[in-house]
Structure formats: structure tokens, C-alpha cells
Image (tube, rainbow, N blue to C red):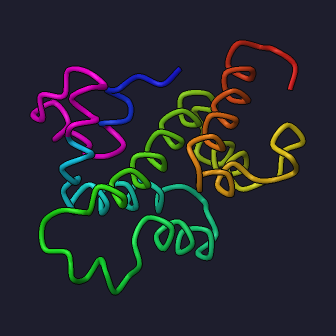
């Protein structure tokens, strides 16, 4: 449902075009080698542009990497931290594609939803299975199916 260029834009902005990321396999290889620290910074600058409560943002930041650990990182995130950052980027890219409005996007991502077991999409980011459930709800919204 979400395209690699959309995810790369969330991760790197205009730099994404220079990264030669042609496929999800290329992306997988990049994740296993660790994403550059600047991608973390870019994602959270984008998130800051949305009307999220500070507690939500700090919770997401801690989900990806602990603040003390981030300070020690000089260049790259670990593969595990990169995977978590990629989940955040995928979700933000999908929700932005579906809602195309920062307030609607923020509202969807932070509110409990009946099809998600009364959890918010951000709460389900902890696992890939949870993210897939959110993707399913977003696809239903995008294609006009009942939610």
C-alpha cells in the first residue's frame, strides 16, 4: 500500500533521490546495515510539523532509541533501531497518503480505533503484526471500504 519513495521521503526528504534505493530489497539491506542518524532527525522533524502532543513525540522517540543511546550514536543506528524507525516512517507515509492533512493524520495516529482493539496506531507500532493491522485499516479507508 505504501510506496518505497514515500517511505524514503519521510526518512530522508530531498536526499532520498540520491540514495539509489530501487527496491524493498535495497531498503532491507540498508536496514540491516543501520540507517544514518540524520534519518532519525529528519523523521522527527516531520513529526514535529504535525499537531502531536509532546508526550506522543517523546514516546515515539524512546520507542525508536533511548535518548542516552542516541547521543552515543555518531553515525548510524543499530539494525534494530533502524527497523523501528522504518516502522514509524512507513506508518507516517501511509497515514499522510490517506489523509493528506496534518491534523487528520495526527488524530488517526493517536486515537483508539475499534478495528485495532481500541488501541491507537502508534500503540501497535511495537510489532510488525500490529503495523500490518494498521495498514489494513488505512487501506480500507483509502479504498472507501467500511471501517
Q: Quadrant of residue 110?
A: bottom right
- Asked whether 15 or 22 is in front, the reply is 22
Identify the residue shown where x is 47% and y is 62%.
Answer: 48
In this view, 3 is above or below 118: above
Which residue, as the protein is rendered here, is positioned at the far bottom? 68
Residue 117 place in picture, x, y as percent:
86, 47
Residue 61 place in picture, x, y as percent:
46, 69
* Image position of 70 (left or right of 144): left
Q: Which region of the structure is painted magenta?
A: 9-29
Magenta residues: mostly which secondary structure? helix
- Tell me, yes or no, whether the highlighted magenta stretch contains residue 60: no
* Image position of 57 (left or right of 141): left
Q: Quadrant of residue 55?
A: bottom right
In this view, 36 is above or below 58: above
Identify the residue shown where x is 54% and y is 55%.
Answer: 50
Residue 38 place in picture, x, y as percent:
21, 60
Amino acid at each position: 500500500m505504501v510506496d518505497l519513495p514515500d517511505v524514503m521521503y519521510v526518512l530522508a526528504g530531498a536526499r532520498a533521490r540520491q540514495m539509489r534505493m530501487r527496491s524493498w530489497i535495497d531498503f532491507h539491506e540498508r536496514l540491516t546495515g543501520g540507517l544514518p542518524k540524520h534519518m532519525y532527525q529528519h523523521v522527527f522533524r516531520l513529526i514535529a510539523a504535525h499537531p502531536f502532543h509532546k508526550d506522543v513525540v517523546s514516546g515515539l522517540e524512546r520507542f525508536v532509541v533511548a535518548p542516552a543511546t542516541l547521543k552515543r550514536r555518531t553515525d548510524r543506528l543499530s539494525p534494530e533501531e533502524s527497523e523501528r524507525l522504518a516502522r514509524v516512517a512507513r506508518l507516517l507515509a501511509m497515514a499522510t497518503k490517506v489523509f493528506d492533512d496534518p491534523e487528520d493524520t495526527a488524530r488517526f495516529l493517536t486515537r483508539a480505533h475499534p478495528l485495532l482493539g481500541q488501541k491507537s496506531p502508534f500503540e501497535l507500532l511495537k510489532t510488525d503484526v500490529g503495523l500490518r493491522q494498521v495498514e489494513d485499516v488505512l487501506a480500507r479507508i483509502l479504498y472507501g471500504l467500511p471501517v
